[in-house]
Image (cartoon, grey):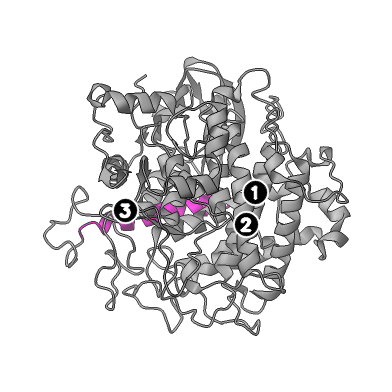
Amino acid sequence: MIKRDFPKIHFYDQDFVDIYDKTWAWIQDCWNTGNEKSTGEKPSGEKSESEKSESEKSLIEQASIETCSPEPPRTEAILIENLLSVSEMVSFENPPGELGWVDMGNSTEQETSVENPPPDIASIDAEQPVDLEHGADPTDAFDLEHPFENEHSFENEHPFDLEHPSENETEAALTENSSPEKASTEKPRISGKFFSYPGSGVVQQVDAIFSSFFLVYSNRIYQAHPTLDIFYEHQEPDGAIRSTYDIATGLPVVEADNPEGLGLPLFAWAEFNLYHKSANKKRVKEVLPILHKYTEWIDSLFKRPNGLYAVPLSATGMVNAPRENAAYPLDFNAMMAINVLYLSALADILNDKEASFQYKRQYFSLKTRINTLMWDNDAGFYYDIDKDEQHILVKTIAGYWPLLAEIPNDDKAERLIDKLQSPQLFGTPHPFPTVAANELAFDENGSGYRGAVFPHLTFMVIKGLERYQRWDFARECAIRHLYFVLDSMSPEGNTHNSHHTGNHHKGNLWEAYLPLREGPAQWTENPAFPRSQYLTYDALSTVCLTIENIVGLFISLPRKTVDWIIPSLEIMGVENLSLKKNMITILSNKSGRGWEIHMESEKLYYFTINILGKKKKTLPIPSGKCSMLIDKL
């Protein structure tokens, strides 16, 4: 198999394959070395290994593999039974119908004493891997509870190195450089390789977080962690991490309407995702204290007596959304729930039951307050609230962050999902607009966050649908979204791109799109909007959604599993996808004998095919080449 090349996808619509391939080539323009673009990488899948510089080869060989993986559904299932038994300590009730989770088993094996004080997160030790965030084996036939027991040492994993994020150092150097205070004072300038928008003089938190979800699919050609490490490196003594830093000086860049430089608190979600394709437990141990301190900083400044977070609207990124009177933005509060939910999952990875329990207490407390104060039962929707805790009755895409946070029960979730299918609300031809189509504030031209379709928010909604097992609808929306992205590259009459002739092989991707027809969104007051080739958002669609929701592959390296979730068999698959030291190929095709799956692997892994509503089977896949007839399973 060819290594050090991007994985290739196979799909019946060649346009999907072409835009996927082109995205990797375009990412080179976003790959920086300090203030200058890196010229060492050759990101196009068509380039040979010999064209890479020796220094780049060295980097690739040293770095740990990080490839995007699915977040297994319902991480909150851990310790639920124990939490219910001590609900008086959490100061709210969680009847079984309100939890909206799936019990995967083994949860009763985890004992936690709530009388103990909160743990010292910095003292967490990396012990034998225990997959606590997923309780049960994926199959009754094979014991996958501890797939790496006595097999793999994490000592050789790529460590979390704050000073040289792409080099392996000794343990002593790692400890010394992991001090946020030292990093921010001795080395303010941003150096090394990282991801940012071309021509920008800053690196942004939103770039670091969302780019990690697609860079991890690059087979180590582009590393996902260095951009995240920049923000950890610049953590201040009080735990503060600002949303934007100047590349030349390393100093934070803040705006008048967001003086603390608060960004989207989604680092823990990104790190959990990285873990499931790197199995780098050592990194989890290093980043967890940083993220704990970051959470404490947010709590100290923005958490109010009602248990919710009062933050500037600009901290959510939805700068001109019709939410001017929102004192407690729904999306930010849901993101904080996501934050502590995945901090709990990271603590589970380290087998620290006490830390996991304390984070879950925070999660359930915030979940209850969001359900109590922000859910409107008459409307069947979550709303922002003002300073008097009154609902601001405008339906925006922010109402769907609770799905990703696993906050609504199944009944609430169904009411939310129904609105995604209604053309009068969020079920517009191009899914999903930032404001419901029947709102007075909705603008069919987009006008920023008053109706435009933003790929990162569509990505968020689709990932939220996965949490409630709506795989079929998630795939349908992903395909529809990709067709609009393709048709918007150079539609007729597109003033941004009028010199192109209307085929999918020319033109640009865009930061935001029109909700009712093809084309980039428009915003009269902001002629620079939307940015072209804004891959922080676009590659989530052209890479992540393509692999995970259209082709349908979900991968977890710690569990040694590949799940293929599809509504029906089609000619599609992936070729040469790196699973650390294992390269796999999975392709489906129809022959004279019926539907056949061809697989190739260098090491054993466990493969589950789930044809929704028809067939589900898990099999061990040995090294070498093999094929299976679906009808014989």
User: Which sits in the foreground, 468 or 512?
Assistant: 512
Of labels 1 and 2, earlier in sequence is 2
* Residue type indicated by callout 3: Tyr
Q: Quadrant of the C terminus?
A: top right
The reply to whether dot 1 and dot 2 touch (C-beta < 8 Å) is yes
- Percent position of residue 583, x then y: 44, 23
User: Which sits in the foreground, 268 or 241?
Assistant: 241
Local secondary structure at mark 3: loop
Q: Quadrant of the N terminus?
A: top left
* Residue type indicated by callout 2: Thr
Residue depicted at 43% across the width and 74% down the height: 256
* Residue type indicated by callout 1: Leu
Can residue 118 be seen in this snapshot? Answer: yes
Local secondary structure at mark 1: helix
Taking the image as shown, residue 109 lies to the left or right of residue 159, namely: right
Residue 343: which disc? 1
Question: Taking 275 as reference, is 535 above or below it?
Answer: below
- Percent position of residue 414, x then y: 62, 63
The magenta stretch is 469-490
Separation of marks 1 and 2 at Cα, in angstroms: 10 Å
Identify the residue under disc 2.
295
- Percent position of residue 410, x then y: 68, 60
Q: Is residue 213 magenta?
A: no
> Majority secondary structure of the magenta segment?
helix
Q: Is residue 487 magenta?
A: yes
Of labels 3 and 1, earlier in sequence is 3
- Percent position of residue 567, x then y: 51, 44
Residue 9 figure quarter: top left
Identify the residue under disc 3.
197
Question: Taking 622 as reference, is 377 above or below it?
Answer: below
Residue depicted at 44% across the width and 51% down the height: 210
Find the residue positioned furthest to the top.
Answer: 624
